[in-house]
Amino acid sequence: MSTVRLTTAQALVRFLSNQYIERDGVEQRMFAGMFGIFGHGNVSGIGQALEEVGEDLTYYRPQNEQAMVHTSIAYARMKNRLQMLACTSSVGPGALNMVTGAATATVNRLPVLLLPGDTFANRIPHPVLQQLEYPLGQDVSVNDCFRPVSRYFDRIARPEQLLSSAPEAMRVLADPAETGAVTLAFPEDTQTESFDYPSNFFEKRVHRIVRQIAPESELRYAAAMIGSSNRPIIVAGGGVIYSEAADSLARFADEFGIPVVTTQAGNGAMPWNHPWYAGPVGSNGGLAANRLAADADLVIAVGTRLSDFTTASRTAFQNPDLRILSINVNAMDAHKAGSFPLVCDAWEALLGLTPLLQAQSYRTDAAYGDLVETLTGEWNAAVDEQRAGIPSVALTQAQAIGLVNSATEPTDVVVCAAGGMPGDLLKLWRPLDPKGYHVEYGFSCMGYEIAGGLGVKMADPDREVFVMVGDGSYLMMHTELVTSIAEGMKLNLVVVDNSGFQCIRGLQMSCGSPSFGNELRYRDPATNRLEGDLIPIDFAANGASLGAVAFSASNPDELVSALEAARNESRSTVIHVRVAKDIQVPGYESWWDVPVAEVSDQPGVNEALEAYNEAIRKQRFLY
């Protein structure tokens, strides 16, 4: 057998360079490159290998290990999980910084390959620099924290172990039902050890994604469920977009008269102005979608895991005769909420159901269509009202969202992740393109926004990317702005400044507590609490110090001018937007389960508890 002698790290890099993915006859490299921050745990191993044999694996230098995973997640999402990035770190804190990103990837069913350095396999130098010793066993390191947040985990302690572990890692990454974070921990000495690897290990491998088709009997049962329904709705999740089934969904809704509502991940699966699109559903949903959901006798969940925000903590669907049909490539997700599971690809499901429903001459009645049209009209008017702002207020967050949306082209992308912004964006942003709305809300990870925006831009450089980020999340992780400038990947950052975590402050006060710990305030020496004056932060100056072109805006005219100027710039921009801190978009007949203290001396908490106990009576146990 022909062999080639390489270090474990060199073999890994060469192997990754020869992996490809193919779906629907389109073939592309599986890995577009590798992010890495080097330290003693990987610089002489994977770092050396990337420099020597990684010509087909572009290296990118980020500023933060967690951020580089977020960038990779966003890249994979834009690529519909058909291309991805790898990330390498040193041992100890560098590795642990990637754990949050790993969870974000796995929760969102998005592929990323993580290659954290690990402590010495031979254990001779232990305790090595940055090693956390575990007293009950020497085979444990901090990298074991990746186990519960990864879809596949292995520790490569010997060079030959790569031969069995790397192909398995590729299988999981490429499988749309199993994908998520895949972690291969590499002890720093093992990375540099050599082995005579079989030459065929480095031959081109094409991982073919076969669209899963449901059995005919299951399709017929699903078609019968739809055919017997009078008030069905389709809840479209991210799986519709990953399957590239947006056009099929629009035709399906048109032909059978079924309104479509969307989740955070599915927003954009139908254009906002489509006659059968009724807006977002759930805790952050809109008036039309939530009213249709309350009365629906059939929920057709397509590519969604029906999280608590989508179901308004199990209160959205109130029809006593409710049934749920769930279409998903992931069997676990398809079985949730007592659904009839149709385990298959979204595009294939819509294709297979269409002739079966045509054979029944199925279509909802005209009265239902009239209701959808009426509710949608009311909802669009409510959105217009919020986006128009309040005459007596200089600028609201809702108004800022509307102005940014109006300044974008249909193929531009808005990126967000955490705080009050995602909920307001879901209600108020009007997407026309399936990739125009990019909000990470599976894990709602603060700090994702700017790094995620970089991943979006890397995946599709021709699109203009607008990152809408709250001041609190910006302060957590903004340094990938530097990476965007270094790589020539222009981002437009809109930093919406409301002086802290105002959405959580609002949630806190709705639970009966006074404001506490959520605003950016000086400490008051008299009370020893953070209730002094608001801390003035110049986010434009901060952005400029990192190399961005910076603007400030405190009213609609200034924001419009800044957005026009930002679009004409060739490098990343930062627009610091000051908004009113106490004005929030309404909930539109929705609810979110946030428990209230059962015992308190505060009257407000006791009043909130009564309201909470009343609300949970509407929860339905869907098994």
Image (cartoon, grey):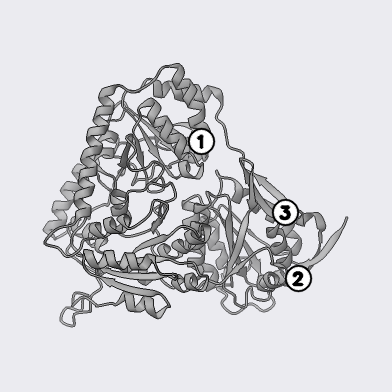
Between tags 2 and 1, which lies in front? 1
Q: Position of residue 98 (x, y in %)?
A: 51, 65
CA gap between label 2 and label 1 equals: 46 Å
| 23 vs 153, nearest the viewer | 23
Q: CA distance from mark 3 to mark 1?
A: 33 Å
Q: Describe the element under mark 3 as helix, strand or loop.
A: helix
Whether residue 585 is visible to the viewer of this picture, yes or no, is no
Callout 2: SS: loop
Q: In this figure, which residue is indicated by the disc labeled 2?
A: 193
Residue 616's quadrant in the figure?
A: top left
For badge 2, the amino acid type reads Glu
Badge 2: few (under 14), some or many (20 or more) residues near its Cα, within 10 Å? some
Q: Are marks 3 and 1 in contact (CB under 8 Å)?
A: no
Which residue lies under the disc numbered 1?
347
Q: Position of residue 533 (x, y in %)?
A: 18, 77
Going by the numbered disc 3, the residue's amino acid type is: Ser
Q: Residues within 10 Å of mark 3 (few under 14, many from 20)?
A: few
Number of on-image labels: 3
Residue 577, above or below 220: below
Residue at image location 69% in from the left, 67% down from the top: 54
Q: Check disc 3 and report the residue beneath it.
A: 164
Secondary structure type for disc 1: helix
Q: Residue 26's quadrant in the figure?
A: top right
Mark 2 vs mark 3, CA separation in Å:
17 Å
Instruction: Depth check: give the residue in front, 368 or 519.
Output: 368
